[in-house]
Image (cartoon, helix red, strand yellow):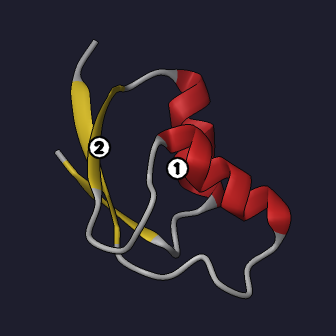
Amino acid sequence: MSTIKIKQVRSKINRPVNQKRTLEALGLRKIGHTVEHKLTPSIEGMIKKVRHLITVIK
């Protein structure tokens, strides 16, 4: 499996609770924070759910 880096680029303020929880599940806390994950189907689903708040760096 490959790994990807995910960076939060937009705020979670005024977002639905499920999007806030998805960001927390990915390990993102604030704008500019970057985390690294193995690319699994569950991570792909989380990325699709909050794709407007993050940037994926391969």
Which of the two discs, 2 and 1, sits closer to the camera?
2
The residue sitting at the top extreme is 1
In space, the residues marked 2 and 1 are separated at their CA atoms by: 12 Å
Residue 1 horizontal side relative to residue 54, left or right: left
Mark 2 or 1 closer to N-term? Answer: 2
Which residue occupies the extreme bottom position in the image? 14
Q: Which mark is residue 19?
A: none
Task: Indicate which disc residue 35 carries.
Answer: 2
Query: Residue at horizontal 66%, vertical 49%?
Result: 22
- What residue is disc 1 on? 47
Instruction: List the single residue furthest toward the left.
Output: 58
Q: Residue at x 29, y 43 (%)?
A: 35
The image position of residue 44, as x and y in percent, is: 52, 37
Where, quadrant-wise, is the C terminus in this rendering?
top left
Percent x, y of residue 34: 25, 53
Q: Is residue 42 above or below residue 1?
A: below
- In the displayed structure, does residue 20 sit left or right of residue 37? right
As helix, strand or loop, the secondary structure at mark 2 comes to strand
**Residue 57: percent from left, percent from top:** 19, 53
Q: Left or right: 18 with respect to 32?
A: right
Relative to 9, is 29 on the left or the right? right
Give the residue furthest to the front. 29
Query: 49 above or below 36?
Result: below
